[in-house]
Image: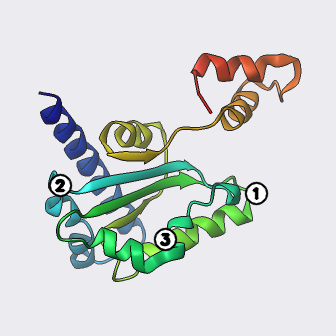
Amino acid sequence: RFVAIRHQLKRDLLIDIRDRYTRQLRRNNVSEATINRATRFVKDIDTKTQILGFARRFATYKRGDLIFRNAERIAALVNSKDRPVQFIFAGKAHPQDRGGKELIQRVVQQSRKSEFRKRVVFIEDYDMSVARYLVQGVDVSRLRAVVREVAGAAAAATGDGGEGGGTAAAARRINVHR
């Protein structure tokens, strides 16, 4: 029963990602033939494909493009016949974070390379709905925030700015661990 639920959650994730990716490509004026090729990964995924998710705020210190430092090894992983892997990236950079925006551009450029096509995907417009599907559907994730990140988000949301201890309390309520 557990395995059936995991497979259903993975299918739900892939359907959501396919739909989002299709809309994203259409927004960027990509041809329908290219969209069909680019979204075929959803049909090609079977239960032996491991899905790894990276979904968070893109900032340079989080090194979201680190896996591409050894591109040959990653290409071998994602194109393995026996145990294929797929990476799904989703996130945003802070509007004033030029380094974070450049990091996203590097991930997108890597995803467009022939050896990564259909196996490395970047989803724009990251939101809580994307996060929910990713948390439930990926096999391995880099989705969990550390206290410092949650504290910063809580400070922004509450207007606390870290003064008066509201930030730490918000991080404890979210129950995030280092």
Label 3 sits on residue: 108
* Label 2, residues with CA under 10 Å away: few <14, some 14-19, many ≥20: few
Q: Residue furthest bottom?
A: 114
Disc ID at residue 122: none
Quadrant position of residue 89: bottom left
Q: Quadrant of the C terminus?
A: top right
Work out how far the residue at label 1 is from the one at label 3, CA to CA, in angstroms: 19 Å
For mark 1, does the 10 Å Cα neighbourhood hold few (<14), some (14 to 19), or many (20 or more) residues?
Answer: few
Count of numbered badges drawn on the protein: 3
Mark found first going from the N terminus, 1 or 3: 1
Give the residue displayed 40% in from the left and 71% down from the top: 74
The residue labelled by disc 2 is: 48
Mark-to-mark CA distance, 3 and 2? 25 Å
Depth check, mark 1 against mark 2: the one in front is 2
Assign the N terminus to one quadrant of the image: top left
Of marks 3 and 2, the one in the foreground: 2
In this figure, which residue is indicated by the disc labeled 1?
96
Q: What whole-number distance in Å separates the C-alpha atoms at marks 1 and 2?
A: 40 Å
Amino acid type at circle 3 is Val
> Mark 3 or mark 2: which comes first in sequence?
2
